[in-house]
Image (cartoon, rainbow, N blue to C red):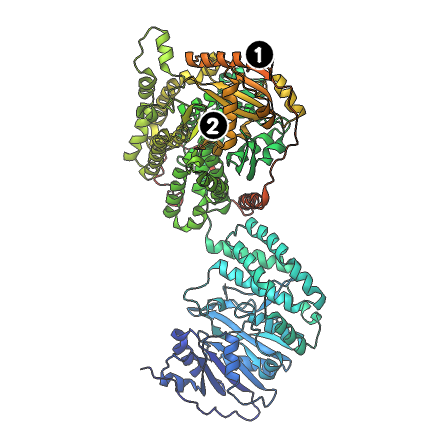
Amino acid sequence: MRVALPGIRDPAPSLGGMPRVTAILVVHDGERWLDGTLAALAAQTRRPDALIVVAEPTTEFRTDALEAAGVTQVVTATGGTFGVGVARALRAVAPVEGEEEWLWLLRADSAPEPEALRALLAAVEVAPSVAVAGPKLVDPADHARLRSYGETVSALGATVVLVDDELDQAQYDPVTDVLAVAVDGSLVRRPVWHALDGLDPGLPSADAGLDLGIRARLAGHRVVRVPAARVERARRPEDVGRKRPASARLRRRIARSAQLHRRFVYAPPLAVPLHWLALLPLALVRTVGQLLAKRPGAVPGELSAAFRALFDPSVPGARSRLRRARTAGWRAVAPLRMRGAALREHRAHERERADDRAGRERDLVRASFLGGGVWVVAATIVAGLVIFWPLLGASTLEGGGLVPLASHAAELWSRLGWGWREIGVGFSGAADPATLLWALLGSATWWDPSFSIVLLWLTALPFAALGAWWAATRLSERAWPPVAAAILWAAAPVFLTALGEGRVGAVLVHLLLPWFVLALVEGARSWSASATASLLFVAIAAAAPVVAPVLLIGVVAWAFARPRGFVRTIGVPIPAIALFAPLVIDAFRRGSPLAALADPGVVLPFTPTSGWGLLIGRPDADAAGWDGILSAVGLPAAGWDTLVPAVLLAPVAALALLSLFLPGAGRSIPALAVAAGGLATAWLAVHLQLSSVGAAVTGPWPGSALSVYWLGLVGAAVVGLDATRRAAVSAGAAAVVAAILAVTPLLGASLVGTAAVHPGDGRILPSLADAAAAADPGIGTLVLTPQPDGSLGAQLQRGEGATLDDQSALHAGRTRLSEEELALADLAGNLASRGGYDPAPELQRFQIAFVLVTAEAPGATAEAEAVRERAVASLDAAPAVTAASDSGYGTLWSFAGLERTEDATPPRGAYGVGVLAVQLGVLLAALLLVIPTRRRRRVVQTRSSLDEPAATTFDEDSDG
């Protein structure tokens, strides 16, 4: 039965000559432990002379429990910290009468063993210099496990808990003198408590006992721990007042706030301003350290603690309290600090115990690279050199979607963030996220940025094979299935099409997808792998934004499938969001909200393929196919481009579908779900119209989404091969040979000259315009391009021309023309038409030094030929311009009357600087997380037998 609060009882008389002990029990929100603690106090062999309970007004007690414990008074207090509760209790008792008065400080969950108080008193009675004595704080469920037993600080003032969750084997009993003990269960000499003015209000939980011990030492007293005294601790001080235990990141923030508070309190007066000024820089440095330590969750707490310390109002009072009580110098504390080798050993011991609690990870078993991987990579190196033989020796590639990069790496990096876009008439806006990719690529060959594209093409096949082999080793421990996966991935129809058409974004997507999946799977258990996945997500989404939604769905699904690693996985898209946010905002502001999904780089229209074409991995109808080959041998055109690949790729599809009915379906189902997502994305891409060039309007190339589809299909096929055991070699060989035959026209396209990509000379404009631009990068060239429908496309190119890094999705996806663009269109129309129009003022306005009518394209329509002839004739007759050259680029005219004005590129402004800072900050944080700082999981490589059982799930911890 529970009743209301009892009245005040008379304290038990103290025996003559015996120390007087006043126990103070602060309840607060610990009502559920109260009865057990009162019972433990009633069982003391040496009972306190007075017992004061501090509780909320709404707290209910059992009368018999209060009487049995000998409660002398109940003080009501609403809220407040432990120190406030003790202070209110002391206001209700008589003043200090002598040196031998003691306070026994207890929380509601601090149930002492029967001999606890007697042992504490026995320790202090023989040592008059002791002012604070602390018991062993033990686990309520197991008194042999220590929760806390002494505290100290490092040389820099960081808290060092001497014992935390260890088995008590009396290993710490010999050393009793310590710098501090926890407040819970401690016995404090009452006159010293009053001299020190109690606990520091600025330390409501963490470090309260540590600060009290330090101040006691500085006042000339000792602090000891008593091995024979045991008091239970059911919760940490940080958990008091909370409905659930504080998380690890919250405990770090509280601990950091307490450390900074103590630093300001203990610092010499002249050092306080220096500490204050160093707070934020130090917080940034520690943020880097937290990221390197793979604790990104601690970063907000680190910054929060620093800002809180900047405006901590409790510091002046705490400094005054310390100054009044201090009688000794800091040398009194120095011997009890932990430093040097002892501190390193202690922290190493803590890390080992943390690893033991986490448990040892299972070894990662994968096929040996020497057992097949090295051979398939070597074979694709040879194949790549043969297929791209015409490209050997080139310094630049052109054709299709390829144009040179800027001539200097610094120019590539200057395009990042938000600022002036030098394309067309120019505008201020966000850069495509792919600009970062172009900068990284160009920096790899900084002496000639465009040469990096050549290296990418020549090494594309072996890199694709390597990535696929490595990813497939997570699906199969056998040697053959990863080899088959490597060949199927390197010979993917969409990959070879992208290489032939010069679609550099799609090539990068295909190369990076296997590594992204590998990092994402591992990211559920590793911050380093998760950060790697986030950077790969950025690269893939930047190279082909249209696949970002399906990747995002996959990341979220994987996060929910692996709840233990949810936080690590769900944060993977964050860097990509940081890079895409300014572009998306600008796209909405310009009235083209889907422009951010457009392919980066040069707008390259394509002829959409059918649904059947998408199923066989054929992204467009323009790629080299079987119709040309079979027509050359006399067979009639009968849809061979679709029929032949469908038949030859049927074994791969059969293996993928068969995997659903074989051991390992737990892995094939997610793989086929990925394939379905990629196929659906490709279908949607075909139906989007986001970009325009001249008279043509086009959407994202579906090939990048088909790479996702092919990834899932090959993954499921690997699972199927892994489960077929001895039939794997024959089934896999048949599928691989058939797949290679299916892409024969694509493999030979570069050799026979039907591929769009070819070696270039590094120029976008004719040599005369290029040389003039080298001397004056601000001059413009008006490029007029005849369109198939008889219209004329006009584009203003500055300097050396519109390089790959100059391209912008905002420019290509604009839905309306600006006034300057309309004026430029009028100028182009008048230049291409005979009449009395004087173009000089407009040429001067746009700083145009050259006019170029592009050369006639192969297979040009009659309408395009007619408009080109008309434009050439009109310009030849125009007195303002002079014919300059006629080359493979087209016919060039120069405007000799140009008077150059100073180029005034608008600055980034505060918004542009802020965007760039945030983006670089997020990427830097991810890079710091990528750096491995912990022991990696052991990898066991095996040349496994075909008779070994197949894995059945994506979880290596459950597969035996």
User: Residues at badges 1 and 2 in contact (C-beta under 8 Å)?
Assistant: no
Query: In this figure, what is the number of numbered marks?
Result: 2
- Along the line of sight, which residue is nearer the eye, 746 or 463? 746
Q: Secondary structure at mark 2?
A: helix
Quadrant of the rendering where the C terminus is positioned: top left
Q: Secondary structure at mark 1?
A: strand
Instruction: Looking at this view, name the residue that lies furthest to the left.
Output: 661
- Along the line of sight, which residue is nearer the eye, 221 or 498? 498
Query: Residue 823 appears at what percent x and percent y?
Result: 51, 28
Which numbered disc, 1 or 2, marks the residue that appears first in the sequence? 2
Residue density around tag 2, few if under 14, some if 14–19, many if 20 or more, within 10 Å: many
Q: Is residue 397 above or below residue 291?
A: above
Quadrant of the rendering where the N terminus is positioned: bottom left
Query: Residue 251 appears at what percent x and percent y?
Result: 51, 62
379 vs 841, left or right, is left
The quarter of the picture where residue 772 lies is: top right
Query: Residue 584 appears at what percent x and percent y?
Result: 46, 40
In this rendering, does residue 141 appear at all? yes
For the residues carrying marks 1 and 2, which lies nearer the camera in this image?
1
Q: Residue at x 59, y 15 (%)?
A: 879
- Residue 496: numbered disc: none
Which residue has dot 1 on it? Answer: 886
Residue density around tag 1, few if under 14, some if 14–19, many if 20 or more, within 10 Å: some
Which residue has dot 2 on it? Answer: 507
Q: Residue at x 60, y 89 (%)?
A: 98
Q: Amino acid at mark 2?
A: Val
Instruction: Looking at this view, name the residue that lies furthest to the top.
Output: 634
Q: Amino acid at mark 1?
A: Asp
